[in-house]
Amino acid sequence: MTQLLAAPPTVRSIVPPPRPAGRWKPWLAAGIVLLITIITMLPGIGVGFSLDAIIRNWQNGAEKILQLLQPDWAFFPRTIAPLVETLQMAVIATAIGAAISLPLSFLAARLTNPNTVSRTVVRFLLNVVRAVPELLYAAILVAMVGVGALPGILALVLFNVGIVVKMVSESIESNDAGALEAGRAAGATQFQINRAIALPDTWPAFVNQTLYVLELNVRASTVLGLVGAGGLGLLIDAVRTFYRYDQLSLIILEILIVVVAIDTVSSAVRKRLV
């Protein structure tokens, strides 16, 4: 019997895949960022950032930190009324800002507003609103309506609308457009489509962003008070003027406790929405 010998399998040489083009681009971008950072730190050209000032004044900073670590608990009764006013400002501004932001979010998103002209106008106005810092809003409004909580609330409302509409409209843009197209094919108006289809999908993101700006409002309202917009900021400005860092430490501790409490409640609400 003749035995047939199978031919040995051919050995193919393993060729490594070609390297992807453009691998040098991230390194170039990192180098440009590093160069710009170095230039901005140079004296006479940039901001003149240097660690020498920190080294020379470390003792002064250590004294201030030591004072901040010793809160003046006897000062607590004087902080209650400004703290309540700060919380009231944050809640009112969040409620008003959320009520304004929800319809504007639908007008700013392409899926819920096919009209290019109105969508462009809304987005442009919101870009203008976001471009102005809330502290500048508060300073202008204090000059217009006087010192108190009202200019702070108005400044926070503008601040909230700029943030919430931006985030919620982007969330709408990321949703599936199939259900909206089906609503149009069925002959529904855009308002009916937004109310029956887009709103249920948008609601979790809207509530999430509203709770987030509530946390921001508590912190921002304390800063707005520095220009006369009410709340804890007025008290912070007073104790800072007299270098009472022990009293300032107590105010910071109160703000921290309030923000942590709001964040805990917000997290619980977000879990229920998922």
Image (tube, rainbow, N blue to C red):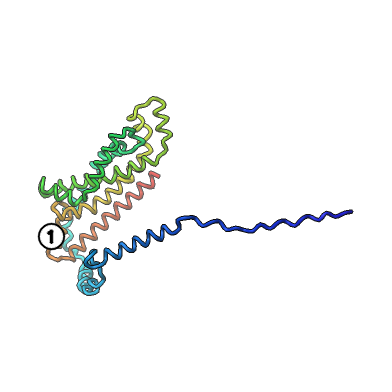
Instruction: Please tell me whether residue 152 is drawn above or below residue 175 in the rendered image.
Output: below
Which residue of the protein is positioned furthest toward the right in this rendering? 1
> In the displayed structure, would residue 190 be above or below residue 234?
above
Instruction: Residue type at mark 1: give it.
Output: Ala
User: Is 7 left or right of 44, judged from the image as shown?
Assistant: right
Is 26 situated left or right of 89 in this image? right
The residue positioned 27% from the left and 51% from the top of the image is 215
Where does residue 243 sit, x and y in percent of width and height? 14, 66
**Disc 1: CA contacts within 10 A as few (<14), some (14-19) or many (>=20):** some
Element assignment for label 1: helix
Q: Nearer the viewer, residue 273 or 162?
A: 162
Q: In the image, is 8 to the left or to the right of 212?
A: right
The total number of labels drawn is: 1
User: Looking at the image, which is closer to me, 52 or 217?
Assistant: 52
Q: Which quadrant of the figure contains the C terminus?
A: top left
Q: Pointer 1: what residue?
A: 238
List x then y, in percent, for residue 78: 15, 58
